[in-house]
Structure formats: C-alpha cells, structure tokens
Image: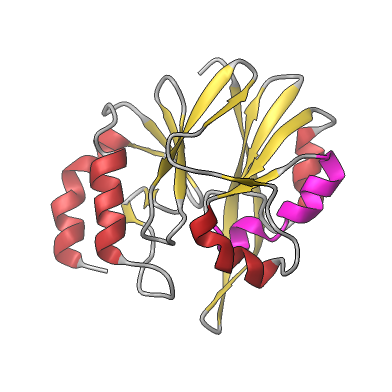
Amino acid sequence: MSARIELVRTRGVFSLDGEDFDVENNIWLVGDDHEVLVIDAAHDAGVIAAAVDGRRVRAVVCTHGHNDHVNAAVDLAQRVDAPVALHPADRMLWDAVHPGRAPDRELHDGDELTVAGTRLRVLHTPGHSPGGVSLLGPDGHVFAGDTLFKGGPGATGRSYSDFGTIIASIRDRLLTLPAGTVVHTGHGDDTTVGDEAPHLGEWIARGG
C-alpha cells in the first residue's frame, strides 16, 4: 500500500442491549504526511486529532454503527473539518449515539475512497451489524472492523446481529482474498486471511 498505515488505540465503553463493556479500540489512519483517512473514531477525539497532527482528513469512515466505533466521530469531524461516512443499514445504531446529526455520506458496496494516491474499496460485510463494512486496499490490506478477528468472527447474538450472515460475509468477501492479505481489526491484533481461513469450519461448528 503506497499510503502509510498508523494505529491509534483508545479505551472506553461499548454499550448495547442494556449492557456495558470496557473495550480498547483500534483506530486506523491511512495516508501520508499531507492527508489521511480515519477509520473508526472511537472514544477520544482529542487523541485521534493529535495523531492526525494537522493533516487534511479526507473522511471519518465508520466500519459500523456501534457506539464504540462512532462515539467520537462527530467531535473529530468538527475538529478536523471532515465528513463522516457510514453504511445506511446501520443508521439506527448511529442515531442512538448521535440523534439529530446524520452522517454526511453513505457508504455502499463497491464505493471507492481515495487518500494519498491509494484507493480503498468498500466491501459490505454485514453480520456483526447490518451495515458493517470492510475497506480493501490495493495490495494486501483489509480493514475489517468487527467482522473478522484473530481467532474468529465478530460477536453476534445481540440486537441487529446474525451469525449466519457474518459467516457468509467472512466466507464470501474476506476469505476469498489472497492468503497474505493483512486483516486490520477493530480490536486486538492484526491477522491474515491465510491464518484464519483454515478455521472456518470450526467457527461454523461452534456457532454464534
């Protein structure tokens, strides 16, 4: 990838269905010395803005609408004068966090985002949430949000999630990528398609 990939981590609370969970989130900055794309503005806009360090932000992209991935998006967008992008199928999750303030742009399968001469293609990968997306770079990187982690699929079993759907997304959209593709996750460590693909049957047997 010609653009540089930077990782920022923040901590906060994920809230859904009346339960709260302490989480650490990965925020990905993709770009160069002049401009960046921010993927998942979580918990602390100040920390993310400091990492941006005055560069132009092409967009604040939300891989899905859960609060721990969007709760700093509006604050950050205002600080850096950038649009917020989200798949419309997750609008109900967004509205629970930011009522009365719509995202600026809808993300759809096949859309392309360009930053620092690099194109990222939007893959609709629902299951963890209806509007979950992954961003595919041109040469061996995919930003998978909470769809695929080191060790298996993102969580299902809560509102708006579905195990069969996330398995289909992983099987058909992510595990079809080259084995060396690096999967940058919404939480925890990176993995690769090659490391995860052999375990698909185990995940299905385990269930949601």
At 57% across and 67% down in the image, what residue appears?
93
At 57% across and 68% down in the image, what residue appears?
92
Q: Is residue 87 above or below residue 193?
A: below
At 31% across and 26% down in the image, what residue appears?
180
Asked if residue 69 lies in the magenta stretch, the reply is yes
Quadrant hosting residue 203: bottom left
List x then y, in percent, for residue 130: 42, 60
Q: Quadrant of the C terminus?
A: bottom left
Q: Is residue 157 above or below residue 78?
A: below
Asked if residue 44 lies in the magenta stretch, the reply is no
Front-lying residue, 55 or 88: 88
Magenta highlight: main SS = helix
List x then y, in percent, for residue 108: 48, 43
Front-lying residue, 116 or 96: 96
Would residue 27 be visible to someone looking at this image?
A: yes
Would residue 144 be visible to someone looking at this image?
A: no
Q: Which residues are magenta?
A: 65-81
Give the left or right position of residue 137, taking residue 174 as reference: right
Quadrant hosting residue 59: top right
List x then y, in percent, for residue 158: 41, 75
Colour scheme used in the picture? Answer: secondary structure
Q: How many marks?
A: 0
